[in-house]
Amino acid sequence: MLSVVSAHSIAGLTDICYTKDGSHFLTCGQDGDIHVFETKSDQVEHIRCADQCHCLVVHEYHVFIGTNRNELEVRSFPHGDSLPSLVHFTQPVSALCLSNSLLFIGTRDFKCVMMNLNDDSNKMKHFDGHQAPILSLNVYEEKRWLATSCCDGSIRIFNIDKQTLIKQLSLIQKSNDIETAVSLVKLDWDKKDQMLAIPVKNTIQFFESEKWTRKKTYENDSIDEAINLIRFSPCGTLFVVAYVNGQLAIINRLTFDICMNYSSKDAVCSLAWNPIESTRFTCSTMAGEYAHVDVSEYLSKPTSTPSDKLDLGAEEEEEMEEVVDELESNSNDVEMAIDDKEVIPKWFERASSMLTETKPIELQEPFQSTSTSKYLESRFLLWNNIGAITCYSEQIQISFHDVSYHHSITIDNKTDKYSVGDLSLSAIALGSSQTGKLCCILYQSWDSNMKEWTINTENNEKIELVTLGGDFLAVATSQRFIRLMSLSGIQQRIIRLQGPIVSMSSYQNHLWMIHHSTQGLPKEQAMSYVLLDIENDHYSTGSLPLTPKTKLSWMGFSDSGKCYYLEKSGHLSMLRHNKGNQLEPLLISNLKQEAEKNTTNYWLLGINDFDGKVQVRVIELRGQSFPDLVPWPLVSIISLPLALYQIDTEKSQLESDYLKMKLFTHSTDEEDFCNTERQCLIKMFALSCKSNREYRAFEICQLMDSIALQLAVKYATKSGKITLAQKITDELIEQKKEQEEKQKEIQRSSSPPPPLRWK
């Protein structure tokens, strides 16, 4: 195992680099801090930079950092004083590479530029052609080559002086963002053999630099996970490979023999060799940790392992197979009297045990919808239609959107350490996972003696989530209990869940919970939901569909009381009651795609699905993951299209209008609803007739009632679609009339008889 040291408080991409003299190494992470370590003593100095830091390099007395502020920030080294920014972009900087005085910058808005730090004019060279965010950069300055990996699935090699594209290789898996990429694809140059080494899935492919054809491939058959990065040692005899499952292998460059294996709970995402001690490197992980590795003891003893495979040419491969077959046949005639443990090297036993070690599935932690990261010093505990609960270091403030409804409330949080909360029209609920204290404030109570009550958990139960309904309070604990209480504190019942809670929400007398149901596939979550109607004592449950390799980011009720949930992939889904009173999961829209059209991110607050429309209340973020408390964020209302194919066409627009009308119309006037439905269907019918799609037009007629069918026949006749008009008349009109008469008879028979009148 890697001997890791914690550096950053928030998990995520963590970058690392050394100073040129090797006296210091620096790390940056998702907590927005830069840590400067002395190499010999690991003494650290902290530099607060931004909300998030994605990458960094150090050049002489300056540190260059890519942050979430859409600019290249500059700090003095080693003190960290803020200096004027060199360049601004529309999206954050995602990759940096320094070669002597040349600084190469890759961004999430598809740009790749170069700056000469010794040139005061700050002129930039552009390397164009990227169609997605830049994953990584690497420079071979002696040859004047720049290699880039990009989320569009391509590796590009540029001539630095001419700014021209030399070669483009479509090798890696496409993704729409760095967070959704299978691998970071951090490539490197083999300067001894003049080759470019590229991580492709679970292999390293080596491309020679004359014709840019693949020369050889490294692969470890026992590991199926993708490779994050490759780095060659300064001496050129070794290279290091890091997998996304946390495995780290040190490999002989010539023989592809594994010298040593390491493993980590989290993937290694960055690696830097010590420029002075060429046998030591430092790596950082996705958990915000770093580790030092010394490879001096392995340089003289490379050892092979049967699970390593070198791709040779066809002739050499056949010769190797013949030799292996001959050796295997000879070995059957020889009896070995030596104990197996004396034959197998000790390092091979350790490496084998590491390779067969299975990594447990990482379950998503509980979260409260609309709350921001618990690692932030100042954050939102909640934002809903009524107000917002904000948490500072030692204080909690409840602010109401309508100040005439109630004034803001401030609560001391120094000792109670409240970490979750909810706000309703009559109460405030706060819970602490550290102290186990639950507090309920009845700020609209008519009883002056009953304005607030508290209770403490017992038997090592930790409060994970709280929610307030119309007249109840629900508390989710670490023991998989949901404790229901009245607003005055009467304990009513304790519901048991089949797995750890993920999130929960309430609406009037309904309580909706999502929990882990079982251990999912690698990098996937398996979740179920429970919907409880407390007033009518009705209980519904089922599996929650999720897209591959994603997690939940929001769940809750719409303004009309429907259940919605949002995944980190951007997919917004709804649980709809069908005619059998079962919940049917439906995909509604992709919020992330809509945000990308406006080059922004959406922080979802709530959903309005009245009047045949789907509108979301969001906070728009640019280059941020979470909204700031200052200045107070502005709420935008965005209309969402349904997730239909070719939504920009007239056909899909009409289909979208019809589906929205069926799914989201809550009109009490039945006649008004029928007229709207007829209009939608007649428009779809007319478009099909204009497009000469009579079969489709007939299918649309099957959705109409008898009144709309009469209109369809008239339109078809005027349009010259005589065959279609005759088919509608013969097959549908009489049939629809009979069905409508039967439905009226059923309604009359099911209605209660009139009351008896006594004379």
Image (cartoon, rainbow, N blue to C red):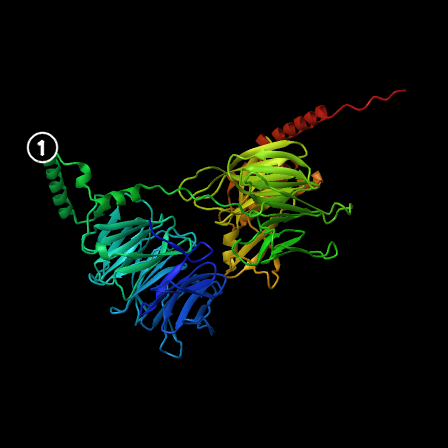
Vertical arrangement, residue 119 with respect to residue 308, above or below? below
**Which residue is at the front of the view, 493 or 629?**
493
Task: Please identify the quarter of the rendering in which residue 477 is found.
Answer: top right
At x 13%, y 41%, the residue is 324
Q: Residue furthest bottom?
A: 120
The residue that label 1 is drawn on is 333
The C terminus, quarter of image: top right
Task: Please identify the quarter of the rendering in which residue 291 is found.
Answer: bottom left
Regarding residue 330, the answer to whether it shows in the image is: yes
At x 61%, y 29%, the residue is 735
**Which residue is at the front of the view, 26 or 657?**
26
Percent position of residue 70, x then y:
47, 65
Q: Residue furthest top?
A: 759
At x 36%, y 70%, the residue is 103
Percent position of residue 565, x then y:
55, 45
Other-residue count near label 1 (Cα within 10 Å), few / some / many at <14 / 14–19 / ≥20 = few
**Which residue is at the front of the view, 106 or 456?**
456
Regarding residue 221, the answer to whether it shows in the image is: no
Q: Is residue 587 left or right of residue 746?
A: left
